[in-house]
Image (cartoon, rainbow, N blue to C red):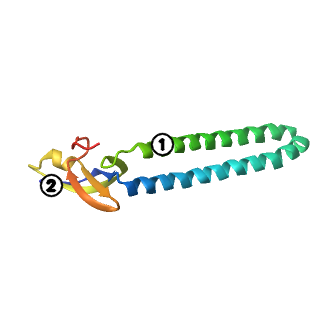
Amino acid sequence: MEAIHLIRPVLVKVKVTDAYKKAAAAEVQEALRRVELELQSLDFQERRLVPELEKKNPQGFAVARQRLDQERSLRQEKRRQLLDQLKGIGQLAEGTEVLFSKMESPVELKLGDDWSKVLGVEVIVQDGTVIEIRQGGIGKDHGHA
């Protein structure tokens, strides 16, 4: 066998610009808004259902209360994570590169190929445009953050 087809990892990185920071912040703020609405909905459910359940089904009341508390805790933790993410976006320095996603691509490996060039690829995107494709990029420092 002289060649084989493999799947290799591809890292997609975004070069931080003012436009990227604004778009990322807007996305996180929208997620925060949805979490806040979910918390309000849980509060409404609790105010509406708890007194009724307490009277009609005391055993079910404890279970319902516990479930509502768990859901509220999950949403509060998500809100905390999103707020941390929003702070992180604000602290990003323009020109740095941040991991956006991980993908895979096929590659043909032949006898004599340079393994480091086959190993991985990084795609660098700036404001929605691919500005660079780096061969052998996985795990290597290219002088970028």
Residue 3, disc: 2
Horizontal side, residue 98 vs residue 40: left or right: left
Which residue is at a point 90% across and 44% down the rendered structure image?
56
Q: Amino acid at mark 2?
A: Ala
The image shows residue 34, relative to residue 62, as above or below, that is below
Q: Amino acid at mark 1?
A: Lys
Could you say whether the residue bearing mark 1 is in a helix, strand or loop?
Answer: helix
The image shows residue 63, relative to residue 120, as above or below, that is above
Disc 1 target residue? 87
Instruction: Determine which quarter of the picture holds residue 50.
Output: top right
Horizontal side, residue 30 vs residue 39: left or right: left
Horizontal side, residue 38 vs residue 32: left or right: right
Q: Position of residue 92 (x, y in %)?
A: 38, 45
Q: Residues within 10 Å of mark 2 (few under 14, many from 20)?
A: few
Nearest the viewer among 113 and 68 is: 68
Q: Position of residue 54 (x, y in %)?
A: 87, 41
Q: Cα distance, mark 2 to mark 1? A: 48 Å
